Amino acid sequence: MDVWQQLAEGFAMALTPTNLLYAALGVLLGTAVGVLPGLGTSLTVALLLPLTYALDPTSAFIMFAGIYYGGAYGGSTTSILLNTPGESSTIVTAIEGNLMAKSGRAAQALATAAIGSFIAGTIGSLLLVVLASPIASLAIQMGAPEYLSVMVLAFVAVTAVLGASRVRGFAALGIGLMIGMVGLDPQSGQQRLTFGVPQLIDGLDIVLVAVAMFAITEALWVASRLRTAPEEAIPVGRPWLSGRDLSRSWRPWLRGTVFGFPFGAIPAGGAEIPTFLSYVTERKLSKHPEEFGTTGAIEGVAGPEAANNSSAAGSVTSMLTLGLPTSATTAVMLAAFTSYGIAPGPQLLQSESELVWTLIASLFIGNALLLLLNLPLAPAWAKLLRIPRPYLYAGIVFFAVLGAFSVNTQAIDIALLAVIGVLGFVLRKFGFPILPVMMGVILGPEAELQLRRALQISDGDVTTLVSSPMTIGVYLVIAVVIAWPLLRWLVGRVRRATGDRPDVQGDRRS
């Protein structure tokens, strides 16, 4: 069946009153958690996951996708108004956006962020429609060695990119892999890391780990650091763009889209790197460089916001076609697929075609809803920040405990929630990134399965792991990623040595 016909059928499903309601609820919640600093879409999806088991999977994933896109929109509001990024992906937006707000141009900054996000999200969704089937078809031809190599690339890329230290990144990955090993060995049936607790024989529920790592950890982090009083919101005014603003914004919107989508689709790409690249590019290409860092340049808001939302579409592409999480939110959404008994990966387009294309159609609908929501309601989101933080995070802990208990209705899950939450807090306290932990928990068992499958097929011949051009290419990329800091250090040392040499010709002239 043609992809456009499948997309049309997806729209027919997504436009039903029930699914429209869940799409609207998702974008509303996503925008709200994007506005509130520190919450994040991954935390919200993790909290709601246990509460949505009674829903139809299609409706639940439409709401989750709305939350994901809504968070990408909403995070720009506090970045611009209060210089407080609601999401890590909107840090760059705060650089020029807050300067524009202080210069009395908050309305223009909010408008270019909302419209740019809509354009980039729509283009990214179109790329998802065009590329989903080819990527899935390619993935079907991959064997166990190829899948293992891609997963190893995901592990290495995440630990190499995130955090201030690679050692901490690999340590966090090791912790995640260890958590993922809890339970029965799939081959021998031996218990692993259960410590004699019968409830751990089936392993740790991914939802419980996600709620603990995001919700409990965040609440403990806020409780340990924040001693703040309510801040006054900056007046926003009526969001609008003049013809001059539009002429300065449309090119950054398109360039940001180009930056964001591929980075969102690759492991550990995320939105942070393309937003920084977009900002640097716009600063280089701008005809008004004097506005950067002073009064605020609109290009510095338009480009990064487009990159942010385009990367979200790229993350959904990788999640649906390869079953690989490239962000914390898609990691939790993959856990949701598993919880519903749906196997993510390249077969998903065939086995759950109706769900996938309805979900893709809902992305277009969600983008339109978000544009209508963010333009007129930006002043209202700023008022949400007046909620006292103790009440806000007390509510988060309450729903986290309720959600964790509802997974298996076992009291031990609450104790595990607390233990893993404290572990997440300690990791964050000492600069260990959380995403490698979640990657290890989710992909660790699957990587172990693919490794054993590859060795069983080849009768234990380890050379089968590098027996195809794809695996060789992937492992070469992994080698470059690992060796890159050493190569950069050597190049820098050579340059410094060359620069320290005396200028022989200059000495002779003197």
Image (tube, helix red, strand yellow):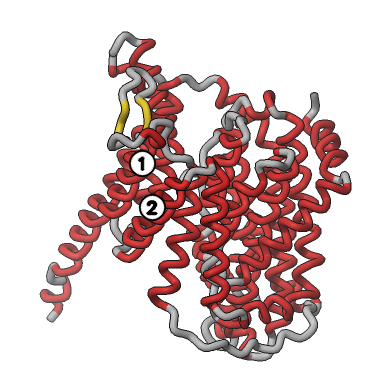
Residue shown at 33% from the left, 50% from the top: 172
Residue 458 is left or right of residue 278, and the answer is left
403, above or below 377, in the image? above
Between 161 and 170, which is closer to the camera in this rendering?
170
- The image quadrant that residue 121 belongs to is bottom right
Residue 65 is left or right of residue 318, and the answer is right
Q: Nearer the viewer, mark 1 or mark 2?
A: 2
Could you tell me residue 276's position as x and y percent?
50, 65
Q: Are marks 1 and 2 in contact (CB under 8 Å)?
A: yes
Q: CA distance from mark 1 to mark 2?
A: 10 Å
Between 128 and 455, which is closer to the camera in this rendering?
455
Three-letter code for the amino acid on which mark 1 is drawn: Ile
Residue shown at 50% from the left, 59% from the top: 215
Three-letter code for the amino acid on which mark 2 is drawn: Ile
116, above or below 477, in the image? below
Residue 479 appears in the picture as rendered: yes
Residue placed farthest to the front in the image? 411
User: Circle 2 — which element?
Assistant: helix
Residue picked out by circle 1: 179
Residue 474 appears in the picture as rendered: no
Q: Quadrant of the N terminus?
A: top right
Task: Tell which circle, 1 or 2, labels the residue nearer the N-terminal end.
Answer: 1
Residue 80 is left or right of residue 438, and the answer is right
186, above or below 168, in the image? above
Q: Which mark is residue 305?
A: none
User: Circle 1 — which element?
Assistant: helix
Residue picked out by circle 2: 420
Could you tell me residue 155's position as x and y percent?
38, 41
Q: Quadrant of the C terminus?
A: bottom left
Crowdedness of circle 2 by 10 Å Cα count: few (<14), some, many (20+)?
many
Could you tell me residue 407's position as x and y percent?
55, 43
